[in-house]
Structure formats: structure tokens, C-alpha cells
Image (cartoon, helix red, strand yellow):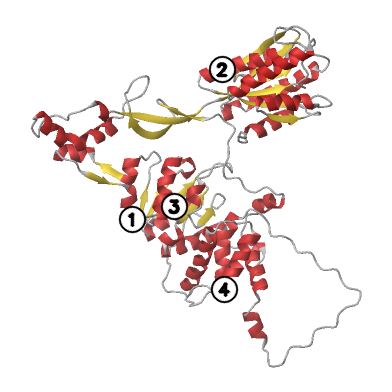
Amino acid sequence: MNAGDAPTPFDDALLAAKLFIRSPLTFGGMVLRGSSPARDALVQALGEAMPCRKMPGHVDDERLLGGIDIAASLAAGKPVEMRGLLAEAVGGALIVPMAERLNEAVAGRLAQALDDRQVALILLDDGIEPDDAPPPSITERLAFHCDLGQSREWEAPSLNAGSGNTAPLCDDDLNALAATAAALGVQSLRPLIFASEAARVHAAMSGRNTAERTDLEAGARLVLAPRATQLPPMEQEPEPDEQEEPPPPPPDSNDTPSDSEQQPSEQELKDLIVEAALASIPPDLLEQLAKGNAPKRAGASGSGQKRKSGLRGKPLGARPGMPRGGARLALIDTLRAAVPWQGVRRREAGADADAPILMRKEDLRIRRFEEKAARVTIFTVDASGSAAAARLAEAKGAVELMLSQAYVTRSEVALIAFRGETAEMILPPTRSLTRAKRALAELPGGGGTPLAMGLNAAREVAHAVRGKGRTPSLVILTDGRANLDAKGQPGRQQAREDAEAAAKAIARDGIDALVVDISARPGPEGQALATAMLARFLALPRADAKALHQAISTVQSQPVPA
């Protein structure tokens, strides 16, 4: 199959939807990425073909799993159980909007429901960046991943899945699918099971009792191709031999050509299925795979650490606690905790059934939120010696580049320069590019290298940043060759020991740090400093501001090594 003959993403999504409604619990569900009229039309068609319930983005455990109905309990004077969304969606599907924002707790409960075959899911993924995606714990359990971001169809036909059964796949068909999965870099067994089931259901929809090549191609195209992480290895053409072998004898006249065409070999079947799967992969993804860049679906975004909050952020549900210190009372959850015990408490207190609700301290619930702390990148620059002008110019350019993205990444930047006998804060933590340019207009340079002073100053600033609830990140530009100690006195031995002690203090405090050696000839001192600090190390002897900014952003987006 040529790339030009491949079905459109909307055609494949329609076919996947038909397979899905034939056996929702077998396939688990669908991931529909990209907000578009085509996705809305497909969701509407799915809702007409099978019962669906929509899950709110801020769902809590009681609404998802069931619990006490407060209003009904107050009216009835006794606990009244409430069904959860998972129970209401049994026999159909649960639609999850903004699935890329699901927290881990809700994702775990949904994954458990999928494993128990209670319900199927339709995830609506509105992520823009490759890292913005639903949790892998759920997407791994859903057969079909459809990207409809570029589709412009606005109306979907009625989804008629038909009826009929198909026999299980033979060994040759299973081997061909397994070889296709291996060629595309799909390591998990779940997609292979999904692909074989998709081939069977596709054959049944076509009225066939056994699966054929087109059914296997459909299974590979719909299930395996969206999960591809590599291109199949290219086979090298054999070199022509000097002495050509005689042509093979003509086939026996008793063998009919139709028989050989209907029964391709296992290798030919595998090649055909791989070709069909490759034809349905988007061209940009093929280009990325050709460059060796597998699609990223998880990882840090470069922003600060996640932290619990009692005031703002993404809701995480309620927990027992006192509403003080800024924590807010979760009234509904408090009532929900108190209602089941009213019968016991009224008997103990001798109250009648019309008495007000008897509350106790252990009934109180407080709200919980999760927010991402803003990251503050603290540049600590060695401004000593003849290289000061170059280092400061690069640091200045990197600061301005990072500040230009501060509004998007919710980050701030600070700058400390150490030289002579002092370490001075040139730029306090700020998000203002104008303020930074004014502060960076004239930077001091030259003199000795009080490295310990600079590290101690950076640690103090990091503590102040952390005290304000933000995440500090140190970027230290130095060659690590100190010649002034922590008191500003000359002496390389003492200066090296003080710098090592200051670096170990940063490591003990658990401050994220990066040591960048931008000297012309990087030596072992910079690497030793990074080791003592438990920091990452970069040697950039020919770095400019843009390269320095790119390197820092790349390192900050990676998880900190244990």
C-alpha cells in the first residue's frame, strides 16, 4: 500500500470506533487526541451507538466510586448510598475530557476499573506539546489511539458494527503481527493482543469466518502504528554475483498462479503488514523516527516541582484535618463523613430523629490542591580574570533568553557574580526583562576567584527562594579553579577546600544544580566541583548565549539523577 492510498486519520478513527463498539471491554477504549470538529462528531456518533457518561475533570473519589448522598441522607434521616460514575457507566463507556490533566490517583482508579472489565473509556486528549498526554497507565490499556487534530470533517456517519464471529488467528497470522510489532519497536504484549482482536473483529464485520491479509493490515494500522517508536530496519540489497546463477526452472504446469498469490509466505505477510502500518503513520512522526527521536509521552516540563497546597491549584480531594493555617473546610465532604454515624450518635446522646446533625472533630475535612512551584534559576558566574568579559556576556545573554520565556514557563531568574574578594548579587529573582537589562548593563569583572564565596551566596539565595515556596535551581559558570578562600584570603589549597565544603553543603540541602565549564580548555576541577555538589556537569568551551540557554533548558527538563 502506498502512502497516498492510505486511509485518512478520520477514516481510521471511524473504523476503530466501529471495532470498539462491537466489544468495548475487549478493547478497553479509545484515545482521541486533538480538539477538532471531527472529534466532536465522532464522540457524538459514539454516544448514539452506546450508552456513555461524562466524567467531570475535578471528580473526587466519592463521585467516581460512590458514597453517601448528603442531600438524600438529610431528607431521609438515614444514610443513603450514592452510585459512582463507574457504576453508572457499566455496559457503556466513560468519556474523560481533558485527559492530559488526569492526576495519578484518578488514573489509578480508572486503570483498576479497566483491569476488572467494569467499564470502557474514551479519553479526550487536548494536549498540544508531545509531553502533554494522558497517563501511560491508562493509555497502555486502551487499544485505539487516534489523532484528529488535523481532521476537518464535521459530521460522522452512523456507526453500524454489524454482527458475526470469526475464528481465532492461525500461528502464521500471529507470527506476522508479532514480527510487525517488533519491527515498529512496540515492546508491550497488550498492543499485540489488541491488534489480533482487531483483525478478528474486522473480519467478522466483513462477513468472513477467517481473518485475511486485509484484516491483519487493519489491526496493525489501527493498533500498532500509533505506538511505533522506530522504523523497521532497512534490508540491504545483495551484491550481484559475477557468475549469475541459472534461472529457476519454470513452475509446474499443475500449480495455478492463484494458489501462490492467496498463500503468501510468512515473511511476505510480515512485509505487507509492516508496509500497511507505515503508510498510516503521519509524515512528521516518520521524520522524527528516521532521526531517532522517539515520541515523548512523559517527562518534566521544565517548571518547578509539584507541591500540595491548601488554597490554589488542581483539586486533589479532601482529607481529615482542621481548617486552620490557611486550609479551607470541605463542607460537603465533612457532612458526608458525619452522616453515616448519626444513628449511633443520637442513641448515645438520647436525641430524637429530628435533632440537628451531631458533628465531631474527626468529621472535619479540608480541601487539598496541587500546584507547580515556580522555578527560580540562579546564575552564579565566575567573573574573575581575563575571561570575565566573555563569561558575563554569555550569562547575560542566557538570562535575557530565559526571561523572554519566563511568562510561559512561570520561571524567574537571578544572577550572582563573584570576583576579587566579594560575591555580589547583580540581579535579584525577577521575571522582568526590562529590570534585568537595566541591572545587567554594567557588570563588574576581573580579580581573584573566591569560588567558595560565590557558592555560599548562591546557597543563601536558594534558601530564600525555597522559603517563599518556589523551586531554586543553580547554574554555576566557572572553571572550578579557586584561588581565594571563604574569607577572601589568597591560597589555592585552602580555597579548594572551602569550595569543596561549600559544594557539599549545597548537596546536603538537596538543591538542584548544574556546573557549566565554559573555559577554553576545561580541566578536571569543574567535574570535581560538580561531583562534590551532586550536580550535573556540562563542558561548553565554545558556548554562546543561545547555546548556553539551550543546554540549560535541556538539562533542567531532564529528571535529576539519583
Q: Position of residue 306 (x, y in %)?
A: 50, 31
Q: Quick one: label 4 or label 3, which is nearer the N terminus?
A: 3
- Residue kind at label 1, given as amino acid type: Val
Q: Reply above or below: 99 against 5.
A: above
Per the image, label 4 sits on a secondary structure element best described as helix
Q: Position of residue 211 (x, y in %)?
A: 53, 74
- Residue kind at label 4, given as amino acid type: Asp
The CA span between labels 4 and 1 is: 35 Å
On-image quarter of the C terminus: top right
Q: Nearer the viewer, residue 39 or 37?
A: 39
Q: Nearer the viewer, residue 502 or 178?
A: 502
Q: Quick one: label 2 or label 3, which is nearer the N terminus?
A: 3
Circles 4 and 2 in contact, beta carbons < 8 Å: no
Answer whether residue 276 is visible to the viewer in this image: no
Q: Position of residue 470 (x, y in %)?
A: 53, 23
List the residue tagged with mark 3: 122
Identify which residue is drawn at 68% across, 10% down. 424
Q: Quick one: label 3 or label 1, which is nearer the N terminus?
A: 1
Q: Which picture quadrant has residue 461?
A: top right
Identify which residue is drawn at 80% across, 11% down. 446
The CA span between labels 1 and 2 is: 51 Å
The CA span between labels 4 and 2 is: 63 Å
Q: Which mark is residue 90?
A: 1
List the residue tagged with mark 2: 463
